[in-house]
Amino acid sequence: MNDVIVSIRGLSHTYMASTPLAAMGLQDASLTLHQGEFSALIGECGSGKSTLVSFLNGLLRPRQEGHVEIFGQDTASPGCDIVSLRRRVGLVFQYPHHQFLEQYVGDDIAHGPRQLGLTKGEIRERVHWAMESVGLDFQGFVDRRTFSLSGGEMRRVALAGILAMEPALLVLDEATTGLDPRGRAQIHDVLRHLRADRGMTILLVSNDMDEVAELTDRVTVLHEGETVLAGPARDILGKPDALEAYGLEPPTTTCVLRALRQAGIPIADTPLTKAETEEAIWQAMRP
Amino acid sequence: MTSDQLIRASNVHYTYDEGVRAVEALCGIDLYVDEGDFVAIAGHNGSGKSTLAKCLNGLLLPTKGDVWVRGQNTRHGSERSLLKIRATVGIVFQHPENQFVATTVREEVAFGPENLGIPGPELHRRVARVLREVGLEGLEERNPHDLSAGQKSRLAIAGTLAMEPHCLILDESTAMLDPIARRNVLALLDDLHDRGLTLILITHSMEEAVLADRVIVLDRGRVALEGSPQSVFADQEVFDELGLNLPVSAAIARELQRRGLYLPGETILTENDLIEALTERVQIET
């Protein structure tokens, strides 16, 4: 396929290499992302997810083994244009307040676009669009102080700040962990729209398999720094035994279906989402 | 007031003064918690859960209304009686690392009881016992900040348990944990409750709320629903209105029932409930 925008192969990374504190971060990790795809990166705590994500915008670059190519650029090469890379790859982290740079919401979201040499009007338009996209009322929030916001609002401001850069690839590193269901559902809607309306490529790093099952179409599994599974979400999440072997809790839907199959109930196909699962059970058991 | 009543809140209001505008977080809360209860306080972000938690052990004093802990009003009394209230009702917060003060696990757990003036030999016994209870034995000399997220959460619980509270309030203490670590912490809580500890679990996860004997749902600073998990989840309309999400299994069961599939047994809340109901149905048919 020629629409590959991220290609990571055989990547290894050791933190504090050649010191007594050396700690293995990645060992033979790989990741492929296609244009317009909604992908998930999963793995237990400490499996190297955040380390791998740091390679996507050049925060880390391959020093040891491995090849990292993002939007056609080899990030290990001295000629790699890191600035243009960072404009195309937006990272949203778990702790939004760690990425605030300004005191007021509007300024914080405008911070990125201001670096792009846009006119005032263009910047304002982008901030407006980004805030509306994440469900923050422009008038109501533009003058609020970032530190007076609730946790859910902070996450939305952090996401809006990244969106205002109009990245081609959006990476959310546990960006919904700890949000309440309503806030989480809002962010999910935002992501679905960004993908449908703007064709944005999205990578979701998550521990919540129910969320991954509902949203994504490709899944990559990391285990102890190594990519152990990768493929369509339906194939990967449809095998709960394999996920459990890697210390992961499979989605509720595929666990329920596994139990029903074991009880001799014939379930057709491989349902994954809540709606598909409910339909499959209905078809198998309808009165 | 019955003798086994541990906490009682009556018409509790709390208003945050943000200078230009006042934010009303609690608007007249009435509740009770008996010795040995396992209560979940649920609600979405901003519903007043954390403010209420802080009112229940005197960290915050209600702007209006009263909270009694074992008959002692948090508003009146000396510094000493307030300390006693806080030793009776301990709180564990969402980011445990924010509450760590020591450089080793052992010192971290000893910090609270040491401040209460517990003598050396008793202190050592207590620290050893509590670390055993939460499963952190063998990590006594580790730096709290080097622990995994799940271990940090257990350490925060251990530090509070070392004060020998009657009641533990967990304010979203599992929200940032991965599913396996969360399950382990919840199993620990279940175990502590079996041994007589009163638990108040503050959560926005309905998967967690179903573990409690009684669920209190807050909405905009008021008690919107209260009762057993079964009865709270049965009130569909109110539940949807509050913007709370049913656990995945409960949502699937509800939809199947709406379409006319009979499912035996009580209200389905958990994955196991759903599997049991469906397999039982097949057995009835065959």
Image (cartoon, grey):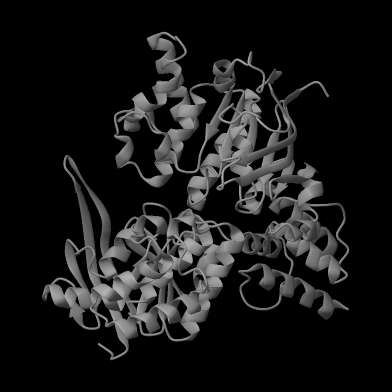
**Residue A2, percent across and down?**
81, 20
Q: Is residue B216 visible?
A: no
Residue A119 as seen in the image, left or right of residue B120 = right
**Which quadrant: the N terminus of chain A?**
top right
- Occupied quadrant, residue A136: top left
**Residue A94, percent across and down?**
50, 43
**Residue A78, percent across and down?**
63, 16
In the foreground, B66 or A13: A13
Residue B200 as seen in the image, left or right of residue B64 = right
**Which quadrant: the C terminus of chain A?**
bottom right
Vertical arrangement, residue B135 with respect to residue B217, above or below: below
In the foreground, B181 or A193: B181
- Occupied quadrant, residue A247: bottom right
Residue B188 as seen in the image, left or right of residue A282 = left
- Occupied quadrant, residue B263: bottom right
In the foreground, A215 or A202: A202
